[in-house]
Amino acid sequence: KGNTECVITAIDLYMKGVSYRGIADSMKQLFGLKVTHVTIINWVNDYMSRINKYVEGLKPNVSDLWNADEQFIKVKGKEAYVWNVLDNETRFLLASNQSPTRTYEDARKTFQIAKQTAQKKAKTIVTDGAFSYERAVRKEFMTYENPKPHYRYVSLNQHDSNNNVIERFHESFRQRDKVMRGFKGNEKQYAENFKTYYNFVRKHQELKTTPAKRAGINESDLWKELLEKSLK
């Protein structure tokens, strides 16, 4: 029923925190188009999956210092976690992995995704004091040339390094979580959608550009161009 302008408007409003029903109303107000919230859900799921697949093939040029952390979310009223790995220099989100548990295996899986995205190993991984990271970092990043890749901070008094950059990212992610009042089973796809939005579309306030451009990816920050390229 819609066109490209309708679809990208729906995607942009959704990633900025508007509900599916609110977007359906906006379609009526902006375009005179009567669609249900189910149609909006289908648009977001279908076209964001295509865009996500397209940007996955774009390799970022990132630093050797990565920050890792997990954040608590609610899924159908139950506890779950989103694990994230962020490049310290470019703020490029290398991995976003959802799991119902908080284990060594979950941390290791997230690091494997980050290495695949970056196509390299970091020399230093900064985490908080959670013990699930210690063995996972050793397993995925320790080498004979780099025997101590893990920086584990446990106190705010440690001024030489901290996890502020990824904690600020979590605040951005949390804004959408508050609007949704918890996830209803779509948390894994939303994490992937937000990863694309954060890296390629949303301009970072401190960097004054997108993390993707800071990481050397010369790609448009417009939904329309990303969508058109993903459909080719």
Image: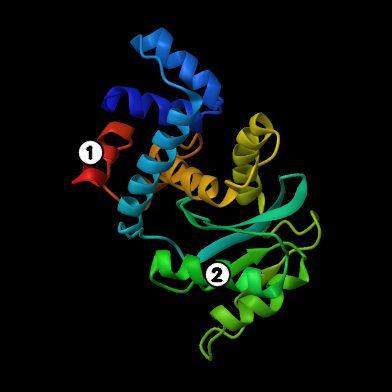
In the displayed image of the protein, which residue is found farthest to the left? 232
Depth check, front residue: 198 or 144: 198
Quarter holding the N terminus is top left
In this rendering, position of residue 200 left or right of residue 180: left
Q: Secondary structure at mark 1?
A: helix
Q: Quadrant of residue 131?
A: bottom right
Q: Secondary structure at mark 2?
A: helix
Q: Which residue is mark 2?
A: 111
Question: Residue 214 at x, y = what percent?
Answer: 38, 48
Question: Residue 156 at x, y = what percent?
Answer: 79, 54
Kind of residue sitting beneath label 2: Phe
Q: Is residue 35 above or below residue 48?
A: above
Bin the neighbour count of mark 2 within 10 Å (Cα to Cα): few under 14, some 14-19, many 20 and up: many
> Quick check: can you spot residue 216?
no
Question: Residue 94 at x, y = what percent?
Answer: 48, 58
The numbered disc on residue 228 is 1
Q: Is residue 138 above or below residue 218?
A: below
The residue positioned 59% from the left and 86% from the top of the image is 147
Bin the neighbour count of mark 1 within 10 Å (Cα to Cα): few under 14, some 14-19, many 20 and up: few
In this rendering, position of residue 179 left or right of residue 46: right
Count every numbered label the image shows and give the total.
Answer: 2
Q: Is residue 227 above or below residue 212?
A: above
Kind of residue sitting beneath label 1: Glu
Disc 1/disc 2 C-alpha distance (Å): 31 Å
The residue positioned 69% from the left and 39% from the top of the image is 182
Which is more N-terminal, label 2 or label 1?
A: 2
User: Is there CB contact under 8 Å for labels 1 and 2?
Assistant: no
The residue positioned 45% from the left and 51% from the top of the image is 90
* Coloration mode: rainbow
